């Protein structure tokens, strides 16, 4: 009888282990470049972007619509600097390319801007075909006040260029609620990622 009880307990423990959802998704490279399109369906906006992120140097850059709009987040010195180069229209000039600069402060430091979410609390919720790719699907639901925010990330894996294991490659990130990446208002957003590269970024990209 004792053997039966022990076997039963072991079986239950194994079932519990294998039934437990996988929590905490892969960690992105600290240096990457990525291209894609930001979609805001309700506003009928499809915004191409090209982003560079370099955590070690505390720098990032995001271009929109080719190089029509460029944004730089440069946190390597002091409290950091945010720069935006974009066409501006005034009463005197129309679509004049203008450089707008904001310096960080002790209470509001400028940090590099990522376009990939941290997947620390995400849960693996299965597999799904997205953009013709068989992806791994990760999800997170958060409630703030009376509003529910749903975040979903789809990824694939490819061989690491260093030859050690595999790396996660982003395919799509969907936000139904607060924009957890760029800090915008409550809405429906999703980003389709077309390319992802973890090579070192030339310093000229941030100049």
Image (cartoon, helix red, strand yellow):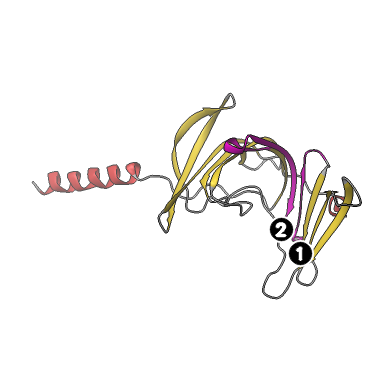
The image shows residue 33 at horizontal and vertical percentages of: 74, 44
Which image quadrant is residue 206 in?
bottom right
Q: Secondary structure at mark 2?
A: loop
Residue under numbered circle 2:
112
At 17% across and 48% down in the image, what residue appears?
Answer: 6
The image shows residue 135 at horizontal and vertical percentages of: 53, 32
Quarter occupied by the C terminus: bottom right
Quick check: 98 left or right of 144?
A: right
User: Is residue 65 found inside the magenta-colored segment of the image?
Assistant: yes
Q: Residue furthest bottom?
A: 106
Q: Against 84, is 138 above or below?
A: above
Q: Against 135, is 67 above or below?
A: below
User: Is residue 178 found inside the magenta-colored segment of the image?
Assistant: no
Residue under numbered circle 1:
75
Looking at the image, tell me whether mark 2 or mark 1 is earlier in sequence order. 1
Quick check: 2 left or right of 86?
A: left
Q: Residue furthest left?
A: 1
The image shows residue 194 at horizontal and vertical percentages of: 69, 33
Q: Which residues are magenta?
A: 37-66
């Amino acid at each position: 009888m004792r053997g039966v009880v022990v076997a039963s307990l072991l079986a239950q423990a194994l079932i519990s282990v294998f039934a437990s959802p996988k929590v905490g998704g892969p960690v992105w490279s600290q240096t990457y470049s990525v291209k894609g399109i930001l979609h805001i369906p309700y506003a009928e906006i499809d915004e191409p972007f090209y982003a560079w992120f370099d955590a070690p140097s505390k720098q990032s850059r995001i271009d929109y619509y080719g190089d029509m709009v460029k944004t730089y987040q440069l946190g390597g010195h002091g409290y950091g600097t945010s720069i935006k180069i974009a066409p501006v229209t005034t009463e005197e000039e129309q679509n004049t390319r203008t450089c707008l600069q904001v310096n960080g402060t002790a209470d509001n430091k400028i940090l590099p801007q990522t376009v990939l979410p941290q997947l620390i609390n995400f849960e693996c919720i299965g597999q799904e075909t997205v953009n013709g790719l068989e992806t791994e699907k990760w999800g997170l639901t958060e409630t703030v006040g009376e509003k529910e925010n749903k975040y979903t990330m789809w990824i694939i894996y490819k061989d690491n260029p260093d030859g050690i294991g595999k790396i996660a490659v982003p395919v799509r990130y969907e936000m139904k609620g607060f924009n957890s990446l760029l800090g915008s208002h409550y809405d429906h957003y999703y980003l389709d990622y077309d390319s992802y590269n973890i090579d070192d970024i030339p310093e000229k990209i941030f100049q």
